[in-house]
Image (cartoon, rainbow, N blue to C red):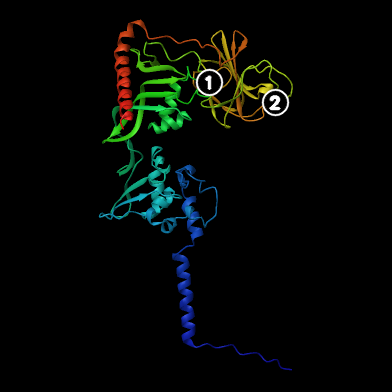
Amino acid sequence: MTQSVPKATSYPRSHLLAASGVAALLSLALLVFPSREVEAKKTYLNLELEKDDLRPVQANGEQGPSPFASAAPTDKNNSAEAGADNKEDHIAKPSNDPLRKSITVASGDTLSTVFSQVGLDANALHEAIGSSKEAKRFGRLHVGQVLDFKLMPDGKLERLGSKLSDLESISLTRGDKGFSFKRELVKPDVRTAYAHGVIDSSLFLSAKRAGLSHGLTMDLANVFGYDIDFAQDLREGDEFELIYEEHVVAGKQVGNGNILSARFTNRGKTYSAVRYTSKQGVTNYYNADGMSMRKAFIRTPVDFARISSRFSLGRRHPILNKIRAHKGVDYAAPRGTPIKAAGDGRVLLAGRKGGYGNTVVIQHGSSYRTLYAHMQGFAKGVRTGSNVKQGQIIGYIGTTGLSTGPHLHYEFQLNGRHVDPLSQKLPMADPIARNEKQRFLQLSKPLMARMDQEKATLLAANKQP
């Protein structure tokens, strides 16, 4: 039997020509417009910058995970096309000069996406930021930061600048030998200001209402930290006042300087402090009579912690459940809270010590020794045999060893005998030298007088109806 073979289907010539045209256009499109996946991989694999310099900026101003950490090609933070998807406040601001563009950094931006928004590719980014170690500072972006670009007629980057703060600006400028980095600092004017507050719940809240920054509040606590235990001594009605430096640029306050003088009334007793720099260039705080505010030991090694257990010879151990002397003070605070050395000395131990867990023991001269236990870890450079300074961070609160929660167990020994650090009278540091006493009083008396006048004016204003 003869098998029949079906005839090939014939198409009109016009249909064949149209199909050929579509295929040609599709091939051309694939060549000219690579996929986003290919583009994203090409953008980052060609960069040799440090990975941290290209992390996206989050809404809180911190940098997010490195774009190198994930290979997901659809993440627009990692794509060279991300600039086209950003909101209007991300894009380049219009300018009368087409070669000048400014971009405000927004959440999710990286330096790569910012460059793409002004038409600069990965090679331009690498050339500029890889030109020097200092240039990599441009990679540490913050939300709200403005980057100013100046382009050359051929589209290349000529200059990149940014104002990091009211006091600091950085820039990159193209020259014959590549880009040069420049850092400009504005020297602020310094003026003095007065602040006064009354404690009703906490020092921080009262200081904030008085207009003090967090840094100034910490400085104030450190000045009086030898005499006042801010973990247990504060009472409602306690009062403070201070004269401090303000940094000003073009009439605008841009920061604070040093506390020049201060007074703190705690439980009805008033402490005064004056900042003084000796002829040898050593700066310390002294009371109005020239006696040093600094003592051989600070009162508490953890700022604003809560006392969870006091010195006792008959305490029941919370884990062993039997009576055992508690030869120290426990300060409860969040895990990772810094712990400070109570005084200058040499580290006898920085390591594990039985039920104490991670422990630091410091010898201070021949008579005194302090111990800090249950640490999460030790600060950089703190090791057995090293020397530490008073107030230096030596470790961080944890819960290692026999511990029911994060806290610091702090012990104080005098001539080998454990004493209560809360009741121990602390030895004083040296007072103002005799040959500088007159010079100190010439500084101290006007500052004390000004605080008296400022406080009187404030009280009179509060009495007015």
Reading the image, the residue beneath label 2 is: 318
Residue 463, percent across and down?
A: 33, 28
Reading the image, the residue beneath label 1 is: 300
Residue 340 in sight: yes
Q: Is residue 49 above or below residue 388?
A: below
Residue occupying the point 52% across, 48% down: 68
- Amino acid of disc 1: Thr
Crowding at dot 2, Cα within 10 Å, few <14 / some 14-19 / many 20+, comes out as: few
Q: Which disc number belongs to residue 124?
A: none
* Of pointers 1 and 2, the one earlier in the residue sequence: 1
Q: Quarter-wise, where is residue 331 in the image?
A: top right
Residue 181 in sight: no
Residue occupying the point 29% across, 13% down: 442
Crowding at dot 1, Cα within 10 Å, few <14 / some 14-19 / many 20+, comes out as: many
Residue 257, percent across and down?
A: 35, 27
Residue 214, percent across and down?
A: 43, 32
**Residue in the foreground of this view, choosing between 125 and 428:** 428
Residue 435, percent across and down?
A: 33, 6
Secondary-structure class at tag 1:
loop
- Amino acid of disc 2: Pro
Q: How many marks?
A: 2
Q: Is residue 412 above or below residue 23?
A: above
**Residue in the foreground of this view, choosing between 85 and 257:** 257
**Residue in the foreground of this view, choosing between 263 and 253:** 263
